[in-house]
Image: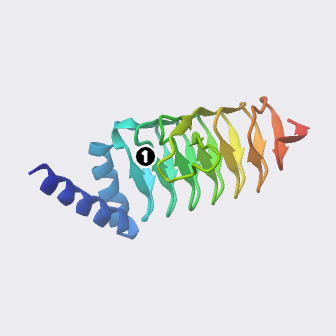
Amino acid sequence: MNYIIEEFLSFIIFFCSSLPGRTGVYLRKILYKFLIYSLGKDFYTENGVVFTGFKNINIGNSVRLMRYSSINADNGHIKLGNNISINYNVNINASGNGEIIFGDNVLVGQNTVFRASDHIYKKDQITYKNMHSSGKIVVGNNVWIGANCVILKNVTIGDNSVIGANSTITKNIEKNKVVVGLNKVIKEI
């Protein structure tokens, strides 16, 4: 019986996530209010957005998710603060016991990846079943992350910082910094 209920729910989620226009926005808002652990006011999501691990996701007020983005909590935890705009095709992934926390007033450019865990591997033992090494990503308040960035585990991006397009962040960024490339600070705000 549980299998039938799960299949039916999967169909409803797929149907609602695929609907375009205002009808789709409205139905997704209603559906996700029941599925996501905590969902604030003024939530907006376009079609094609995928969630996994609904019960491990907290979303604040005035959060916008654009098309084809994914929020993957599974056995991790994701918390998005207030006034957040996530552009097209962004992946926020805390699967593998990771944790991702966004403060308030965060902008994320398209095609950006946040990954709070990675694979543990040994020589001659690379398989899809490798265990994960989990970590944490914290994005402070008033942060702008440009397009095509990669933010890896065990990173904190300080308040009032800007991460330039095509950057890869592998270590902490202090507050009030403009960063490009591989953790390269080019300016203080």
With 153 as the anchor, is 97 left or right in this view? left
How crowded pointer 1 is (Cα within 10 Å; few <14, some 14-19, many 20+) is rated as few
Rendered residue at 35%/69% (across/down): 19
Q: Is residue 113 visible?
A: yes
State which quadrant residue 53 falls in: top left
* Residue, far left: 1
- Which residue in the structure is indicated by mark 1? 42
Rendered residue at 72%/30% (across/down): 158
What type is the residue that disc 1 sits on? Asp
Q: Nearer the viewer, residue 170 or 62?
A: 170
Q: Nearer the viewer, residue 132 or 77?
A: 132
Q: Could you say where residue 61 lies in the image, as x and y percent from the top left?
A: 46, 39
Query: What element does badge 1 sit on?
Result: loop
Q: Nearer the viewer, residue 116 or 86?
A: 116
Asked if residue 107 is positioned above or below residue 57 in the image, the reply reads below
Asked if residue 155 is positioned above or below residue 152 in the image, the reply reads above
Q: Could you say where residue 141 lies in the image, as x and y percent from the top left?
A: 65, 33
Q: Could you say where residue 150 lies in the image, as x and y percent from the top left?
A: 68, 50
Asked if residue 15 is positioned above or below residue 189 in the image, the reply reads below
With 71 as the anchor, is 139 left or right in this view? right
With 165 as the anchor, is 36 left or right in this view? left
Rendered residue at 52%/46% (across/down): 93
Q: Nearer the viewer, residue 115 or 66?
A: 115
* Residue, far front: 124
Quadrant in the picture for the C terminus: top right
